[in-house]
Image (spheres, rainbow, N blue to C red):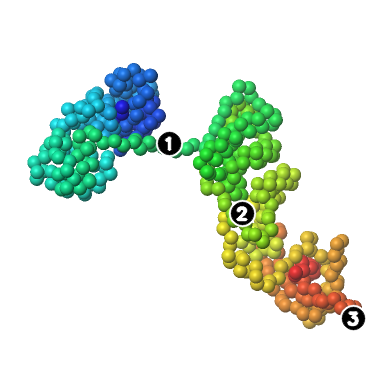
Amino acid sequence: MFACIYTEKITPELSPELSLTDFAYAFSPVVEETKPGTVVIDADGCDLLFGSAYQLANEMARRAREPQASGGLDTSVSVAIAANPDAAIHAATRLPGITFVSAGEELSCLGEFPIQHLKPELVGIEEKAAAEIFETLRLWGVVTFADFASLPVTGVSERLGQDGVRLQQLAAGKTERHLKIKQLAPVFANSLELEHPLSELEPLSFVFARLLHQLCAALNSYALATNELRVELQLEDRTLHERRLSLPYPMRDHKVFLKLLLLDTEMHPPAAAVTAISLACEPVKPRVVQNGLFVPLAPAPDKLELTLARIAKLVGEENLGSPALLDTHRPDAFTLNKFVLPSKPNNRHAENSKRQCLGLRMFRPPLRAVVETSQGLPAQISAWGKQRSVYGKVVQLAGPWRTTGDWWREDRWARDEWDVAVTPSNKTSTEAPGLYRIYRKLDSEMWFVEGNYD
């Protein structure tokens, strides 16, 4: 048995808090939303809770008239019970109140309906094709469902095709189909209210483990992963402690999530005892990587993320990341961004890596140098540090390049830079010249060796 619930009010206007579909789920777990204002449920088994089919229909109509605060719709609905869903839909949309259609007696209820009220979309017929069939039936003098159902099936098939046969079965209330169940959107979130406030990390870890296991199981059931985990802790002082863990690549391993969450909680502890915990995530497609047979395996991304989290706990989150140049001419100006794994290989970078290029190895701090000049150009360099030294004769050079900026700040800079090739002063040395970047501060006339080229 099937029950159709119909209301003339459109669902969004009906109730902003409770839709007609949500209302139908209170009676059966199998619900089809045919169109706004019309839903069909599978009533088999509902008699255990609501009694007979007629009692079920009366209960639906009664609850619909209740206010929204009580779970009702605050409006009257039409309810029809029938042996197939299409007959129930036609009866509910045409007859007010409660209608019961017995199996095999569909035409006694539907037979007087005008043929124009037949719903061809229920049997998958396009509106244009149905309009042509209805026009043909009008010319034949077919007016009602009963007139159409009384025509010989062979003649209908020969003149109207299979679309006409399906419409005839629809008019006779003899169609057979399964309900198109509306799948509820999955919600990847879990929460738990604690019986007693928790202020220590160890008991919190057991609650985190339970919620994360449920969350990852839901992701795994839909073949999804997540790259962001949101944590909300309700505290004893009625404040909310929120944290957001952004992951470099999608994952769904609850053990990795637990370790990351515990490390983050240690670095950012809540201000008071925790009374409730909520975890949520945004589902994304998992990352799939095809490794080459002759490419060495890189560290597993989840192990790398755990290692970075442990390092961040030691040195601070602001001192860990991937360096990125700032949009300025200031020498050695950079910031640290979070590590993010690219989803696709960058072919442009691969092509550039094949080209020969020089890399500048920075000396931190730069080496204080003594430079002899000839006609304003570096000719001899002597620089020593704790770990390295640079000395010798300049055999080739390029520059100078003058760079200045931020004159209004105390840490302004102004200097001339050279790229020089230095060879040892010892004539018996066979070492190749080294390539270095040197500069002279304009304000103090001091020389420094900034780095060497590899």
- Asked whether, in this view, residue 358 is left or right of residue 181, the answer is right
Res 318 visible: no
Q: Amino acid at mark 2?
A: Leu
Viewer-side label of 2, 1: 1
- The location of residue 85, given as percent across then percent down, is 29, 32
Q: Residue at x 14, y 44 (%)?
A: 155
* C-alpha gap between disc 2 and disc 1: 33 Å
* C-alpha gap between disc 3 and disc 1: 83 Å
Viewer-side label of 3, 1: 1
- The location of residue 452, given as percent across then percent down, is 77, 69
Q: Quadrant of the N terminus?
A: top left
Res 255 visible: yes
Eyeballing the image, is 337 above or below 144?
below
Quarter residue 172 falls in = top left
Q: Residue 184, labelled with which disc?
A: 1
- The location of residue 433, given as percent across then percent down, is 81, 76
Considering the numbered disc 3 on the image, is that residue within a helix, a strand or a loop? loop
Q: Which residue is mark 2?
A: 341
- Asked whether, in this view, residue 423 is left or right of residue 289, the answer is right
Quarter residue 408 falls in = bottom right
Considering the numbered disc 2 on the image, is that residue within a helix, a strand or a loop? loop
- Asked whether, in this view, residue 171 is left or right of residue 394, the answer is left
Q: Residue at x 75, y 70 (%)?
A: 453
**How many numbered circles are shown?**
3
Task: Judge by depth and name the residue closer to the eye, 21 or 47.
Answer: 47
Eyeballing the image, is 221 above or below 383?
above
Considering the numbered disc 1 on the image, is that residue within a helix, a strand or a loop? loop
Q: Few, some or many C-alpha atoms within 10 Å of disc 3 (few <14, some 14-19, many ≥20)?
A: few
Q: Which residue is mark 3?
A: 427
